[in-house]
Amino acid sequence: MFLGIVERLLNDDGLFLLHTIGNHLTCRKVDPWIDKYVFPNGWVPSASEVANAVEGRFLIEDWHNFGADYDRTLMAWWDNFAGA
């Protein structure tokens, strides 16, 4: 549904950025902690799920994994939160 909306609204020569947190494996259930504290009723897609969803709709021009940097970001957020 979401990608259909993007596809409909995007100009023919437009660019679309998808920034998501993903999983290295396709799972059929969400981790209970993630579901409760991070993304209630959400889904953490795998790379193959993202690729399958965009196939035939969009061209993946670039793919980055910011895992190591994102860990530092989360720790800085935690330090700020804990110090407040």
Image (tube, grey):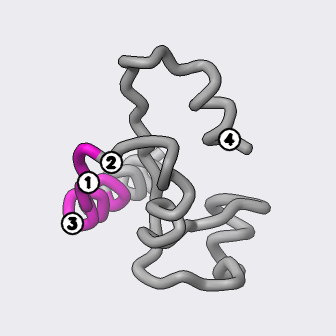
Q: Looking at this view, is 78 or 16 the one in front?
A: 16
Side of 22 where 76 appears, left or right: left
Residue 47 drawn at (x, y percent): 42, 69
Residue 48 drawn at (x, y percent): 46, 72
Does 22 lie within the magenta span? Answer: no
Is 3 drawn above or below residue 21 in the view shown? Answer: above
| Spatial CA span between label 4 and label 2 | 17 Å
Is 3 drawn above or below residue 9 in the view shown? Answer: below
Quadrant of image for the N terminus:
top right
Badge 2 marks a residue whose secondary structure is: loop
Amino acid type, residue under disc 4 in the picture: Phe
Crowdedness near tag 1: few (<14), some (14–19) or many (≥20) residues, C-alpha within 10 Å = few
| Spatial CA span between label 3 and label 2 | 22 Å
According to the picture, the residue beneath numbered tag 1 turns out to be 63
Badge 1 marks a residue whose secondary structure is: loop
Q: Which numbered tag is attached to residue 2?
A: 4
Tell me where the magenta segment starts and ends, as one range: 61-75
